[in-house]
Amino acid sequence: MAQLMKIDGKRLLQDLLVLRDFTDTPGSGVTRFSYGTQDKKAREYLFEQAKALGCRIETDALKNVRIHMPQNKPECKRVVIGSHVDTVRNGGWLDGIYGVTGGLAVLRALKDCQLNRNLELVIFAEEEGSNFGSTMTGSKFITGSYGDPDLDKLKNDQDISLRTILGDPSPADLEAVRWDFAQIEAMLELHIEQGPVLERKGLPLGIVEAIFGMQVIEVEIKGVGNHAGATPMVDRKDALCAAAQCILAAEDMVRPDGISVVTVGRIHAEPDCSNVIPEKARFTLEVRDRDNKKIQTYMDRITAAFKEICSQRGVDCQITRTSSSKPLSLDTGLIETMKGLAEKKRIPHQVMDSGAVHDACMIANHARTGMIFVPSIGGRSHVPEEDTKKEDLILGAQFLLDLASDLTGA
Ligand code: HGY
Ligand code: MN
Ligand code: MN
Ligand code: MN
């Protein structure tokens, strides 16, 4: 019976088109930061859809959301389907939200077949880290890797802390954010691949076996500000030129044909005037790989090189680590189940890594976790051009439904 259940693909695509419009940058991608107006509108829309299915909705102090099938027996083990609704700035219309709407489509299909399943749909808050520079913030509080002190440490660009944004949650509120993993049968996340592999191989489905780890540092270089016209080159201590030399040195260190990746995504010079030699330069740098030792080795080499370059230039260099997550291999038993299901349904697929991090990384340390990928057109993501073929979006959600049905004993 369960295998005959079908995803309503039209509704899924309709949900995605409605949610795409909840953006602060209409016409240039989706910008929907956690705790902002667009985030609120997206949640209201999703809550409306879930309430129409009779679901019960709980929002915790971090604004993670748990959506329970009406007949969920609280004491029974549940399969959780989760992802995020927040985006990067000028991001795509599918990253995160596709996994949430795919999960909603599964709830709808079960409801249409009057099948009571212990299934829960979860929205993880602040997965992208767009507010505070720390990815997977909501799931880090769920799993206890973040706690009360982090509410003050995490501050946005306006220097407002997470604690202020959340209205100063009490220790009891934070305690209630923690999941009782004894109740979790498995966690599944449906996501776009965000890379080129599946499209290049012409495969509609990816089964994730390992998720890269990452370390992020913030580098602040302090030189001497001065007049751009009256200061001879030999007398300069230009913070931005020092930063530029550091950034290219980091890029040179990472092999172009290797797995490790290094990215400087944010940079800011002060006072940021065309006729003033920059006194300060601040930038972020992240290293990712599937091997934690490699990440550490690169990070050690890069930070040592930065110190060397800055001392030669006579400028000061302060480095702080802002966030990190360890590489993680997902549950081998669940991978085998997913491979078996794909074979049974004759879906061409491959087992693969994820260079992007996901809330699945945090949950997988506490419960069986599986990730399903669908191809990204042109292998692009975190940009307005992010897209996936409609038939692939529907196939991924159908696979999620069949997998969730198998796991919940449908
Ligand atoms: O950065 C990432 O990998 C994820 O999109 N937050
Ligand atoms: Mn994502
Ligand atoms: Mn993302
Ligand atoms: Mn002047």
Image (tube, helix red, strand yellow):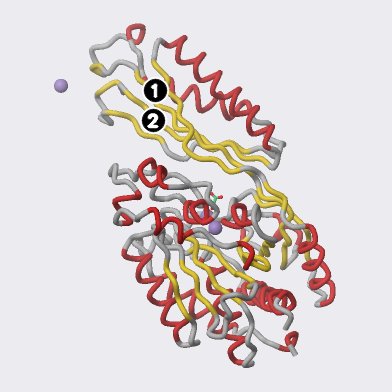
Q: Quadrant of residue 181?
A: bottom right
**Image height of 269 relative to 148, above or below:** above
Ligand 2 is found in the corner quadrant, namely bottom right
Quarter placement of the N terminus: bottom right
Looking at the rendered structure, the secondary structure element under dot 1 is strand
Amino acid marked by disc 2: Arg
- 295 to the left or right of 225: right
- Above or below, 213 relative to 198: above
Q: Amino acid at mark 1?
A: Ile
The crowd level at tag 2 (other Cα within 10 Å; few <14, some 14-19, many 20+) is: many
What percent of the width, then of the height, locates residue 124?
Answer: 49, 61
Residue 250: x and y in percent read: 56, 27
Instruction: Kindly identify which residue carries mark 1.
Output: 221
Along the horizontal axis of the image, is 400 left or right of 338?
Answer: left
Cα gap from disc 1 to disc 2, whole angstroms: 6 Å
Q: Residues within 10 Å of mark 1 (few under 14, many from 20)?
A: many
Q: Residue at x 60, y 69 (%)?
A: 81
Side (left or right) of 259 relative to 37:
right
Q: Earlier in the sequence, mark 1 or mark 2?
A: 1
Q: Which mark is residue 309?
A: none
- The structure residue drawn at horizontal position 67% and vertical position 66%, both measured from the top left corner, is 186
Q: Which residue is mark 2?
A: 282
Q: Quadrant of residue 400?
A: bottom right
Q: Residue at x 43, y 11 (%)?
A: 313
Q: Residue at x 61, y 40 (%)?
A: 288
Residue 37 locus on image (x, y percent): 31, 64
Percent of width and height locating residue 126: 45, 55
> In the rendered structure, are the residues bearing label 1 and label 2 in contact, judged by CB atoms less than 8 Å apart?
yes
Choose between 73 and 280: the one closer to the eye. 73
Q: Quadrant of the C terminus?
A: bottom right
